[in-house]
Image (cartoon, grey):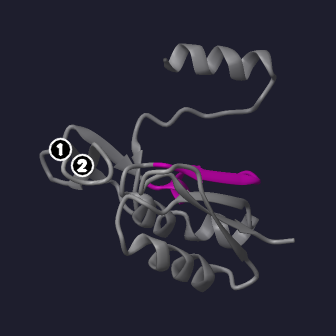
Amino acid sequence: MIEHITKKLENQQVAYEIINAGMSNEESFALSYDKKDEQSAFSLQAALNGNIKLDYIDNHMKEKVSMIKMDIEGFEYRALVGAKQTISLFQPYLAICVYHKQEDIWKIPELIYSICPRYKFYLRHYSLFPNETVLYAIIS
């Protein structure tokens, strides 16, 4: 899959960096687990002995960022905390999934607003089911 993505990006002459880690608010580890009884069938849980390395966006983004999209199975809030500097400095368009945790639908816009109150928020639901809801934050 990664090879397919990198080939497509190279063909379109898109600048990219692959970071072999999940995004969070710190450098740590997470454990993936199945949660079929909830909205998402897969999720992450912070764990010292986890199998997924975690890092944060501000640790990598030194050049202008124009958009950040997140659908990271319940780690969106943490990843946004780890992107505070990037969001504040570059004010990119944001497309953030807010359906993995019930509180995300209000906590994530509050967090983004606390980082940069210039954002305007739009919510779009893409499914007949209780998932696939995306929060768009845009400065126009």
Name the residue beneath numbered marker 2: 30
The C terminus lies in quadrant: bottom right
Tell me: residue 113, above or below residue 45. Answer: below
Report, in whole angstroms, how far the alpha carbon at label 1 lies from the one at label 2. 4 Å
Sequence-wise first label, 1 or 2: 2
Give the magenta part as a residue range: 56-71
Tell me the number on the disc at residue 50: 1
The disc labelled 1 sits on which kind of residue?
Gly
Q: Viewed as shown, does residue 75 lie left or right of 38?
A: right
Residue found at the very far front of the displayed protein: 128
Residue found at the very far right of the displayed protein: 140
Q: Which residue does the image show at 20% across and 37% down from the upper left?
A: 51
Where does the image place residue 57, in percent across and percent down from the top left? 53, 55
Q: Which residue does the image show at 40% across and 40% down from the upper left?
A: 21
In the foreground, 79 or 120: 120
User: Dot 2, crowdedness within 10 Å: few (<14), some or many (≥20)?
Assistant: many
Is residue 13 highlighted in magenta? no
Q: Viewed as shown, does residue 115 lie left or right of 56?
A: right
Is the C-beta separation of discs 1 and 2 under 8 Å? yes
